[in-house]
Image: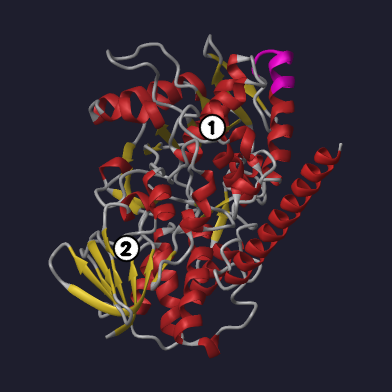
Amino acid sequence: MLDVIVVGGGVAGLSAAHKLKKAGLKIAVLEAQDRVGGRTLTQPVDIGQGKTELFDLGGQWVGTSQKHVMNILRELGLETYPQYTTGTKVMQLGSDSKIRTYNSDIPPLGSIRGLVQLQLFIWKVEKMAAQTPIQDPYGSPHAQELDGLTVDSFARKHLSCEAALQVVDVACKVAFGADATRISAIFFLAYSNAAGGVMKILEAKEETAQEARVKGGTQQISQILAQRLGDEIVFLSHPVVRLDQTEENVKVTTENGKTFEARRVIMTAPPNMIIKMKFSPPLPPSKKLIYENLPIGHLIKFVVVYDKAFWRENGFSGEVVSNGGSERLPSGLTRGPLSVCFDATTHRGTPAIVGFIAARQGVEWQGKTIDERKSAVLEGLADTLGSSARHCVSYTEKIWAEEPYIGGCPVVFGVPGVSFALPHLRSPFDRLHFAGTETATEWTGYISGAIQSADRAAAEVLKNLRPELVSENDLKGTCYDPESILGENRTKQKLQSDSYFIIVAVFIMVISIVYAALL
């Protein structure tokens, strides 16, 4: 009998397992794929002359404000280097898809009116995001107003400039792998809240999402943790298909027919994969509802290697924000492939550009051949960064929708109407505890969020199996935290508070009736 089974061998699962092993628990990690790392994937890429170098084809950026990932990088002895941002940026937005350059944080949009609209909208959204806690988005004063709106429909209430609307859409494409027409506005605000603001997600400077990269790639986090745990703990190619709970334990069954039993289980698989598993007893209605309404984004990530960083020589940073353009398109496509690109030159100096074919564009372009995608990407880069972009050393891509046990990238996103159930993502279900970056309350959706969620879930397990090892501080943010939205004491307080207000309301109503009768 095991103490804990961890379902998922990504950053969250292996971080939780690492912490529990140090506490002396007997554990097993069940990973569906034949590798560890989840949505982090570092692979050798052709850099010419028969040589290769490692590039991240999954999650790659970290930042100094992401304390959980920075802590584990230090523990594992991994180093970072800053994202290159020096020089002019390029945008291709608006109904004319005209290519413009800029050096500010937000694109110029081609008109003063559009720029003013966008800046005012960003200020408004930043303020609203600060009032929308990821722990309980429905507690936001804007929940009732925004619950049924998409990001697109909300933006159209405030923006009439087409280029400004496209900025919002491109932001959604890259952050979620989904168009703004699909994402809940309240979910977007809560997600931004967890990062410290909307611009924190979009920018590539100090203390933002794209601040730095890891030397040698981010998959090393999972690989090193798996090595420290050992093959006797980490089981690859073991997709979980069923979980049966009793009063004493949990039996976990894998696709290959093997069974494992433990006193507790930590689920770290993406929500869109968890809902495909069978549970006995069934998941609670609120949990089932939220899992059924969290689709995962669609993202094709590409890396283009060059023999020199021609964009730097020409004064460009390599950053491109694009609607894809609509010229020279094969039949059946509405837009070109580009959404956002960055300089991907490695710490060893290998010049490269990284970019994304996202959301609807990703779905459309997935139906084309790799040669067609490569040709279109190079043409897009030539339009925005210069004709030298057509002559690359290599083109490498990763279509995340083709990962059978992940289904997409970078994260899942909430659809309108279900924000009230979001807190149930991280609530335990009897002996099952839930982690994974989507359950994080700091930097949700990022590598750092995955580690934070692992710390929380591990603390919840230790509270049950080794209570002497956890302090009151360790339990902050867990279901055992009295201040947590899902904490036992908080729930009792809320019920008492609700009862109080009901009594007061009834008392006022009775007084009103008596008063009316006397009149």
Q: Within the image, what quadrant is residue 221 found in?
A: bottom left
**Secondary structure beneath label 1:** loop
Q: Within the image, what quadrant is residue 300 found in?
A: top left
The magenta segment is 109-117
Residue 476 or 342: which is nearer the viewer? 476
73 sits to left or right of 41: right
Identify the image quadrant of the C terminus.
top right
Q: Callout 2 environment at 10 Å: few (<14), some (14 to 19), or many (20+)?
A: many
Q: Disc 2 designates what residue?
A: 36
Q: Is residue 343 above or below residue 360?
A: below
Q: Is residue 353 visible?
A: no
Q: Amino acid at mark 1?
A: Gly
Residue at 45% x, 67% y is 428
Q: Disc 1 designates what residue?
A: 148
398 sits to left or right of 347: left
Residue at 32% x, 37% y is 394
In percent of width and height, residue 323 lies at 49, 22
Q: Amino acid at mark 2?
A: Val
Residue 110 is one of the magenta-drawn residues: yes
